[in-house]
Image: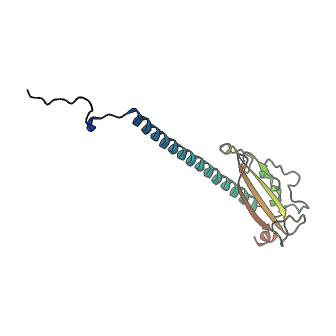
Amino acid sequence: MNTPPRRVGRRPAAARALTLAEIVVSTAIIGVVLVAALNAVGAAATASHKLNGRQHAVLLAEQLMNEILLLPYEDPVGPTKACSPESGEDGSNRGTFDDVDDYNGFKCSPPQDGTGAGMSDLAGFGFQAKVFWVSTADLATESGVETGLKRIEVFVEVDGLPAAELIALRSQAWDASQ
């Protein structure tokens, strides 16, 4: 049998194997790409969580603001000289509130519904409201006296950080037009 002589020494380029240096370099490149991808996924998850929290905060703020705006401008029993809850109105149970200014100084964390039942799925959230008389010339400045116009501010926090703020104005004229 006639077999061609074998070459001793270098192998042909097609049969050459990977060197240790090539394996180390390719492993390092794959590692860097993997770390970058994991960082991108982590950043996207964090951003999604924050956006979800903000959306919940806005919905809570809208819910509380709507609840406040549905109430009369003044106490139905009789007008008071202060923008605050009257005696017998319990700040822990919004069901006793019967006018807009009863919400002045209201704070709740974690949030509760209008009857005072806790919303356990919203741990870390909290909201508060502020109601005060404003001058018709400057709608941002507290007037301290009855002007026929109240500014209502609702704030929602998530994990102690501001997440949503709503501002509305309520007038005596609105009640008269209803």
**Residue depicted at 78% across the width and 61% down the height:** 152
34 vs 16, left or right, is right
Indicate the quadrant where residue 149 lies: bottom right
Quarter of the picture holding the C terminus: bottom right
Point out residue 108 in the picture as x, y percentages from the top left corner.
Answer: 76, 48
Quarter of the picture holding the N terminus: top left
**Residue depicted at 87% across the width and 51% down the height:** 88
* Colouring scheme applied when the structure was drawn: rainbow
118 vs 3, left or right, is right
Q: Is 131 drawn above or below residue 123 in the view shown?
A: below
63 vs 151, left or right, is left
- Residue nearest the viewer, comparing 26 with 49: 26
- Residue nearest the viewer, comparing 149 with 143: 143
Point out residue 17 in the picture as x, y percentages from the top left corner.
Answer: 32, 34
Is residue 72 visible from the viewing direction of this image? no
> Furthest-top residue in view?
1
- Residue nearest the viewer, comparing 79 with 42: 42
Task: Tell how many labels.
Answer: 0
**Residue depicted at 67% across the width and 53% down the height:** 57
- Residue nearest the viewer, comparing 149 with 8: 8
109 vs 148, left or right, is left
Point out residue 123 in the picture as x, y percentages from the top left corner.
Answer: 69, 43
Is residue 152 visible from the viewing direction of this image? yes
Indicate the quadrant where residue 148 lies: bottom right
> Furthest-left residue in view?
1
**Residue depicted at 42% across the width and 39% down the height:** 26
Point out residue 78 in the picture as x, y percentages from the top left corner.
Answer: 88, 62
